[in-house]
Amino acid sequence: MNYQLCPSILSADFNRLGEQIHEVETAGVKWLHIDVMDGDFVPSISYGMPVITSIRRESRMFFDVHLMVTDPERYIADFKKSGADMLTVHAEACRHLDRTIDAIREAGMKAGVALNPATPLCMLEHVLHKTDMVLIMSVNPGFGGQSYIPESTRKIRMLREMIAQRGLSVDVEVDGGINSQTIDTVLEAGANIIVAGSAVFSGNITENIRKLTERIEMRCCK
Ligand code: DX5
Ligand code: ZN
């Protein structure tokens, strides 16, 4: 299983973004989580293609782009051009989810599907086989620094079972409220891509990454 700590730059200090991304990469991180918010699907607005284009020049990390955007299919080509490696779209935000997944893959990127806390796993029934990753939101999307919703644990476990029953190899990402108190629970439930925003960027970044990575490695080696 491919286990990754995936720091979310939403919690970075944007005045020192390049510097902080460099610190994250130097600490050994391979995946970077980039949250794009449109002020429609979620209340807040974050950043988009120009920021991704600019950080792409400085980083070799895998860019995991989480689109909290209504009708994201409109922007697939633009995100590819800006340097995204994976686009994760919300099932709730796509009118034609199946077509959107196909279009992301045809554009040469990996395709992820995100589910809000209240959205059931049955939304994946007919698309799971063509999905590279499922993102279980463990907070309601839109802001960093919220608390983990405990019901997410059962959902991660059920998803992992669903993937195993079908003999698929789909990554399970968890996003929202992950820190040193909650990380063991989500790993144990079956998540392998672990997003962390405030838990990485508040305080000493290198030290935070070291502590969280240690927990992930303990899990991998079990
Ligand atoms: C929330 C975003 C998250 C956010 C996580 O809508 O999708 O990626 O940055 O932040 P923390 O880890 O602080 O909950
Ligand atoms: Zn996210």
Image (spheres, rainbow, N blue to C red):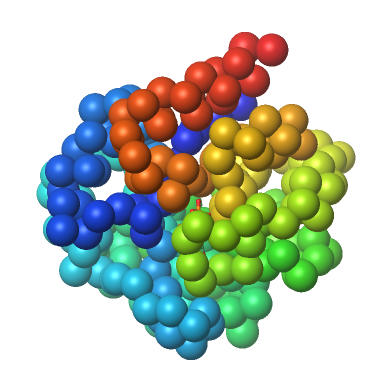
Q: Position of residue 96 (x, y in %)?
A: 62, 80
Is 162 situated above or below 10? above
Is 51 situated above or below 6? below
Residue found 44% across the figure and 50% down from its top = 197
Q: Which image quarter holds the C terminus?
A: top right
Q: Where is residue 147 in the image (x, y as percent from the top left)?
A: 62, 56
> Along the line of sight, which residue is nearer the eye, 70 or 208?
208
Residue found 24% across the figure and 27% down from its top = 26
Residue found 43% across the figure and 84% down from its top = 39
Is 19 situated above or below 100? above
Residue found 43% across the figure and 79% down from its top = 44
Question: Is residue 71 in sight in this rendering?
Answer: no
Is 71 situated above or below 136? below
- In the rendered view, does 190 fall on the left or right side of 98? right
> Along the line of sight, which residue is nearer the eye, 208 or 171?
208
> Along the line of sight, which residue is nearer the eye, 68 or 161?
68
- In the rendered view, does 219 fall on the left or right side of 58? right
Q: Where is residue 28 in the image (x, y as percent from the top left)?
A: 33, 25
- In the rendered view, does 26 fall on the left or right side of 129? left
- Identify the image quadrant of residue 203: top left
Question: Is residue 43 in sight in this rendering?
Answer: yes
Numbered disc total: 0
